Amino acid sequence: MITAIPPIALTVGANRVVRGVAIPHPVGDPGEEPAVEFEIRKKLLEKALRALCEPIKEQTLFE
Amino acid sequence: MKTIRAVHYLNQFFGQLGGEEMANLPPRIVDGPVGFGVTLKGASGGRVEIVRTVICGDNYAAENTEELAKEVLRWVSETSPDLFLAGPAFGAGRYGIASGTLCKEVRGKLGIPSVTAMHPVNPGVEMAGHEVFVVEAKDSAQDLKRVLPMMLDIGIRLVDGLSIGNPGEEGYLPRGVRVNVRATKRGSARAVQMLLKKLAGEPFETELPMPTYDRVLPAAPVRDLARAIIAIGTEGGIVPRGNPDRIEAHNASKWCRYDIAGFDGLEKGDYEVAHGGYDPVPANEDPDRVLPLDAARVLEREGRFHKLHDWYPVTVGNVTAVRSAERFGRQMGEALAAEGVEGVILTST
């Protein structure tokens, strides 16, 4: 789960949480150049893929 | 009776500074009441006077809750009020989180009685903690007139040091606090009464509700990404142009699946935001900002995982009933697992 508000994700029971950029654009940043923005998005997805491969016993925020 | 000086927290909408387009607004103060705050004096029979109003944009508040709390504690101390009021936030999650957190901080750090109101499933209820009174509200602002006098009544009694009854009688949400009371019948008699009612299928009220936690057993990790099918999905309401299946902008009744096989990204105009709870401009401009298809496709090509799944699940998580959301989640998970998907990356707005 990529979200700008990890506390809500944890409250409702999400187990693998990655902090996103902002509420209206969790995987983007309109303030950046398109190439930079794409890199931010790609990095967040890479982090999410790592989270999927991580064995966890409890809810975990992947910072 | 002395006048009760209160500080009131509002979001940008109730603070009359704008709608979703102003949701990034940092906190600010107005010395005096704002919006419906001006009616509080009359509604409290002249007892409660709003001496300061704090207004903050919903996005700013939810994304920077700690900073907001620091700022608000300073602004509240400056005015040394008798009471802190926040909201009502109704079903609004971001507003509720801010209201619950601020009430908890003001009550905990400054010792000032704090009252808010929201819908029972608002995540802000959990933020408010044991010491804050959260009046039970419906999920929309139509409930304002009913809820305000209840907030004021509890607030006034807290300041006056008068007792507050049970949650059921007073209309606030249970805080998880136990209070000693003298019952007319002894425990064994009450327990047998309850058991008889239960056996007869009649309603009864337990004296010790079991806590309910939204805990889900973590799924096993993906063993080998190089062989795994990965899906992307969102509750952010990214749908094809025109929202063909009419997913509701508010309290969605369904989730949908849309084909993305062969697409390298989501083009502006071909996809749009159906979600009614956040500023849609950035994601209408580039829907990949909420549903990251372009980057997922590149990672697939780079061999970071075997294959991106051919469709994505989507719904709108805006004041959506938790029960519906649970059902959507279960159905999405079953449908994806049945097609061999091993991992899902969801985004939440």
Image (cartoon, coloured by chain):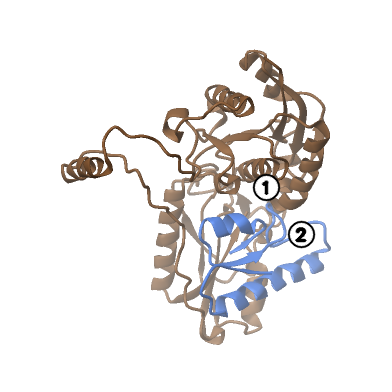
Chain colours: A blue, B brown
Q: Position of residue B78 (x, y in %)?
A: 83, 35
Residue designated by label 1: B280
Question: Image height check: is B291 above or below B337?
Answer: above
Question: Image height check: is B9 above or below B287?
Answer: above
* The quadrant where residue B83 appears: top right
- Which image quarter holds the N terminus of chain B? top right
Left or right: B231 in relation to A63? left
Can marks 1 and 2 be said to lie on one chain? no
Residue designated by label 2: A29
Q: Residue at x 66, y 83 (%)?
A: B302
- Residue type, label 2: Asp
Q: Position of residue B126 (x, y in %)?
A: 55, 48
Q: Which residue is drawn at 46% across and 45% down?
A: B321
Foreground residue among B183 and B168: B183
* The quadrant where residue B197 appears: top left
In three-dimensional space, the C-alpha distance between marks 1 and 2, rounded to whole angstroms, equals: 13 Å
